[in-house]
Structure formats: structure tokens, C-alpha cells
Amino acid sequence: MNSNKTLFGLIVLFTITMSNAQNTGEDEIGAWYMYFGTNRVSEKLSIHSEAQFRFYEVGSTFNQLLLRTGLNYHIEDKAIATLGYGYISTDGSFEDIPGEENAKEHRIFQQFILKNTSGKFKFEHRYRLEQRFISTQNDDFTEHRARYRLQLTYPINDKWFLNAYDEVFINLQEPIFGQNRLYAAIGYNVQSNFSIQLGYLKNHFTGINFDRLQLGVFYNTDFRKKDNN
């Protein structure tokens, strides 16, 4: 009887420990499914379109919906300025644990992208400022932050390529450090304006890390009038 009680106690303790460890999804391999598009409307202007569906686990347990758009001004081929808007809906719970806050966010952002090449390597520097208007179940507040991403792309051949980036998030209020994202992927050019990337993201916050698989679809369109002459 005592051994049965001991076994039962260990099972309960193990269950509680595993549940607590999974509250934030840190011990799960999650997934982000993403679409990105640049839709050219003139020589200088294009429209950014983006949708991301983020999950605590690869195929279930919704975490976040992110929709983003923006107006791009192409200063030149390797320099682009953007003014944009994003809507983010976040489910802060995991495995139906009560007490976690959900949030909805309206976000305005300003962005500048600068590109350069060195041999076969393609570099992209992305600078972004964000004004975040956040509503939770208990409060409404505004936050500001800056982001910098250094991205590196290496073409293996005409179809396959490697992609990697590191992005740091700096809050413009306490705490200063927001997060850091380290990403690596392999990509395939289906067409000249259509590519797919499959990658891995290490998302680091203070005291916690998330491992996320990423599947990204990139599809660019061109609505400029063609010259038939």
C-alpha cells in the first residue's frame, strides 16, 4: 500500500512539474507559419503585406496572429523606407491554464532597409521603430521600442539559398532589453518572384528561450503598367 501511495505521489508530482514547465511553451517546439509580400505599384512605391500564425506547438495550441502592412518608398534599389501598421492578437495561455493574460495590439512602425553585397553574400540591415498600443484584460498602455536586424543570404545555385539573421529588440522604457531572435533557414526559389523558406528560430527573452520552426512563403507582385513598345 505504501509503495502504491509513493508511486501515486510521484506521478502527481511529475504531472504538476511538467504542466508548470509547459506554461510558457519553453519546453515545446513551436511553429510560425508566415507569408510576406512586396507588391510594386510604381517605380518608387510598393505595398508590404504580411500574415503570421504562431503556435506553441508545431500543429496546435494557438499563440499569436500578426497582420502587418505598410507603404514602401524605394529611394533606390538598395534603400527602402516604410511607414506601416500592424495588428497583433496574442493568446498568453498554454494548455488551457487559467490566469494568463490575452492581449490585442495596434502597432505603428517606421522602417529603413539598406542592402549591400560582398561577393556572393547579400547583406540586409533593417532598422525599425515601433509605437505599440496594447490592451489586455486588465489594462491599456503604450510602449515604444527599436529593432535592428542583420540578415545574410547566400545563394547555393539558381534555386537554393541559405538565409540567416540576428535581430535585437531594445525597449525605450524599462526594461531596456526586449528580446533577441537568431534564425537560420534553407530556401528554394520556386519562381523569380516566389520563394519558400524552412528554418529554425531561437527566440531569447530575459531568463527564457523559445525554439520555433518557421515556414515562410514570399510572393512578390508587380502592378506597374508594362511598356508594350
Image: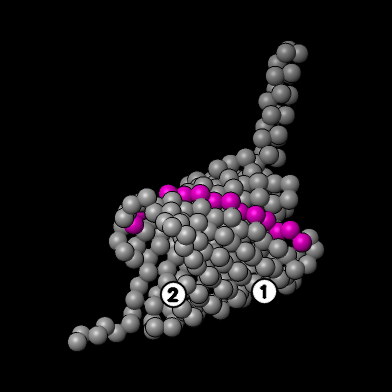
Towards the viewer: 27 or 22 = 27
Horizontally, residue 171 falls left or right of residue 53, namely right
Q: CA distance from mark 1 to mark 2?
A: 27 Å
Whether 103 is drawn above or below 5: the answer is below
Principal SS element in the magenta part?
Answer: strand
The quarter of the picture where the C terminus appears is: bottom left
User: Amino acid type of disc 2?
Assistant: Asp
The residue depicted at 58 percent of the width and 45 percent of the height is 211
The residue depicted at 70 percent of the width and 46 percent of the height is 208
Residue 39: x and y, percent?
40, 75
| Earlier-in-chain disc, 1 versus 2 | 2
For label 2, the SS is loop
Towards the viewer: 174 or 158 = 158
Please name which of the two marks, 1 or 2, marks the residue nearer to the observer. Answer: 2
Residue 69: x and y, percent?
50, 74
> What numbered label is drawn on residue 77?
2
The quarter of the picture where the N terminus appears is: top right
- Which residue in the rendered view is the most extreme toward the left? 229
Over which residues does the magenta segment extend? Answer: 176-189
> What numbered label is drawn on residue 131?
1
Horizontally, residue 73 falls left or right of residue 133, namely left
Asked which quadrant contains residue 159, the reply is bottom left
Towards the viewer: 164 or 32 = 164
Q: Tell me if I can see residue 204 in this picture.
A: yes
> What numbered label is drawn on residue 211?
none
Residue 92: x and y, percent?
65, 55
Q: Is 179 in the magenta?
A: yes
For label 1, the SS is strand
Residue 189: x and y, percent?
34, 57
Q: How would you rate the neighbour count of disc 2 (Cα within 10 Å): few for under 14, some for 14-19, many for 20 or more?
A: few
